[in-house]
Image: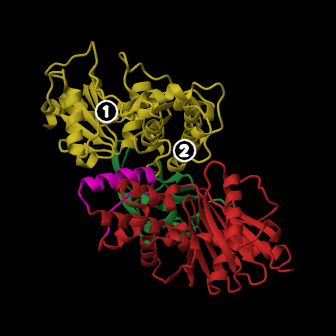
Chain colours: A green, B yellow, C red
Amino acid sequence: MISYYGYSDGSGEYFIIVDSEKCSGCQKCVNQCPKNALHIELLFIDLEDKPVASVKEAFCNKIQYICAQCKPEKNQTPCTLACPNKAIKCLYTTPATV
Amino acid sequence: MTLQTDNAFWRWQEYHRVMPDKSWTSTDVITAGVDVGSVGSKAAVLVNGEIYSWGITRTGSNSPDSAVKALNWALKDTGLKQSDCKYIVGTGYGRVNIPFANKALTEIACHAKGANYIWGSQVHTVLDVGGQDIKAIRCDDTGRVTSFLMNDKCAAGTGRGMEVFADLLQIPIEEIGEMSLKVDEEPPSVSCTCVAFAKTEAVGLLRKGWSKEKVLAAYTKAMAVRMSNLIKRVGLEPDLVITGGQSKNIGIVSRVEAALGVKCLAMPNWRENGLDPMIAGALGAGILQKPSMINPKTLEATT
Amino acid sequence: MTTSTIGFDIGTQTIKVIILNNKTRQVVARTQAFAGFDPAQALKTAVEQALKTANLTQTDITTFATTGSNLETYPYPVITVSTMSALTKAGTHFFPQAHTIIEVGAEEARAVKCDDRGLMVDFVVNERCAAGAGAFIEAMARALEVKMEDMGPLSLEAERASSINAACVIFGESDVVSLIHKQEPKSEIARAVYDAMADRVSAMVHRLGVNPQVVLVGGVAKDVGFIASLKRKLGVEVFIPEFSEYAGALGAALIGLTKSGGNKN
């Protein structure tokens, strides 16, 4: 299952994307996040609960600001680089110019 | 069907329904799903895994009461009591606060499963437009989620956003869909999806002499484009269905179809005997229990 | 005879007009008008009023410069200046040591990073979501039934802030209403509104890095509640110029004056 955490609003799109099939729940991304925005959560997949990485609920609606310092538009953030399975990535648009 | 009347333009009707030609006996397994959303609370009662009755109410200020109210509505005129439900799954925004639930599940899984039940295995993309969020879900033939996106940060396109417009234009929420289609030609959409800005823009357009219908069309179009973009984000795989309150908004449905270039599966005739797309989440919650729970024999063995 | 330059900033809500003396580069007049549904007419009226205040006629004006994006055609021959350039120019004109310039208006928020020479190096904009702009405070003030000008002072009375989760104006309104029902003090709700707003603006600034001096301009720069919250979030002193809401117009006038060949009398 591919989970998109984040949102799009009038200004752009801001998502952290986790592929639960690739995610092993190893916690490496969780440990690397400077904002402590990630955690390992039990997700209901195939009628079973599986521990996978996800964005904490309180942070989902602040991705644009929380993640800004890691420059997620380049998809080279600490969390994405830490993942051995490439299970986590960013989709982040910088607000357009006038 | 019980109707409540209210003068507020943004209020929709609460109701409950027992499926005709269906009944239960004491040997049947009764389960229930309760979906406490931000605006509406829905409950579905299932007999041996088949939908039997449901209730739709407005969510009050606290989730436990709303859950009880929704389930009581669903149980009304059925002869069943809450204690007859062997297993109850809670879902939705207020799922963690449902006192009688045996399990809580995220609404994503429930909506996909519910849509799969209502429309069948050809459903592969579900757009759920709730009161305070929009979910775009991709699923396989069995209703298992393969990809999802939930947007609850922004009111654009949500039921709440529509209510703001219904209120601004003084039109009952149930009529805004039809009304938005009463234009000779589709006007350009409002320039900004942000509801707060769109509202200001709409007031300006009204003063410029635009009709309410035209303003609604322009706004509805912007919202539909936004929803389509969310679907494109997770990837559109036909067939597409729309659930949640906005599935009843023909203005939104037809414009989402136009923006994506596909037709949605037809909505069941919920006013007569069909299932209401608003209960997809509750229904899915009622179904999404381990199969062993549904089988009366194993259930007896485990209890 | 002294010639002058007029700069205007066509905002979504208000039009700001400033008259600059070409020689002294001093502001000789400034006016503000509600943009309304005929911004071109509103602009004309505002310009006439400014000229009257400065005791000038249109023939004394060598250059018209404009910034802001709410008008397609102008009743004057104008030099168009980008909002970012105007903002940078005005910020560094007020405070030559400025390295971070933030503008928060009714419907947009912008931040510019500039180097020691006052040249723009990087910038961020938010103008498509009301939650990051002055409109957020306005809407919450309405929900609180507090006058806009009372919001700031009210928030300063609070020692703590209520918790508001909403990152959207529309959802924020319902949040505020339910907090009122819970009988939370209005001052604490007001403080929460400013904190939420400052959170968004400071995160925007963090993208550029917080480089002192930090200058705040725009309509919201006059709001004491917002200033207090922003200072807390950024952890540095925030400098606010006099008539901060005219920054765009001033920047446009200064750049227009330079572009038109300076102060030839």
Residue depicted at 25% across the width and 46% down the height: B61
Alpha-carbon neighbours of circle 1 within 10 Å: few (<14), some, or many (≥20)?
many
Q: Amino acid at mark 2?
A: Leu
Residue depicted at 58% across the width and 69% down the height: C245
Q: Nearer the viewer, residue B98 or C3?
A: C3
Where residue C77 sits: x, y (%)? 82, 61
Residue depicted at 30% across the width and 24% down the height: B51
Instruction: Give the letter of the chain under mark 1.
Output: B
Label 2 or label 1, whichever comes before in sequence order:
2
C36 with respect to B139 (left or right): right
Residue depicted at 37% across the width and 26% down the height: B276
Distance from Cα at disc 2 to Cα at disc 1 = 27 Å
Where residue B135 sits: x, y (%)? 46, 43
C72 with respect to C148 (left or right): right
Alpha-carbon neighbours of circle 2 within 10 Å: few (<14), some, or many (≥20)?
many
Q: Nearer the viewer, residue C223 or C128?
A: C223
C3 with respect to C120 (left or right): right
Residue lying furthest top: B21
Span shown in magenta = C161-184
Mark 1, secondary structure of its residue? helix
Q: Quadrant of residue A26?
A: bottom left
C52 with respect to C155 (left or right): right
Residue position marked by numbered label 2 in the rendering: B230
Where residue B246 sits: x, y (%)? 45, 33
Residue position marked by numbered label 1 in the rendering: B287
Q: Quadrant of residue B204?
A: top right
The label nearer to you, 2 versus 1, is: 2
Vertical placement of residue C93 versus C161, above or below: below
Q: Nearer the viewer, residue C25 or C2?
A: C2
Q: Nearer the viewer, residue C130 or B32?
A: C130
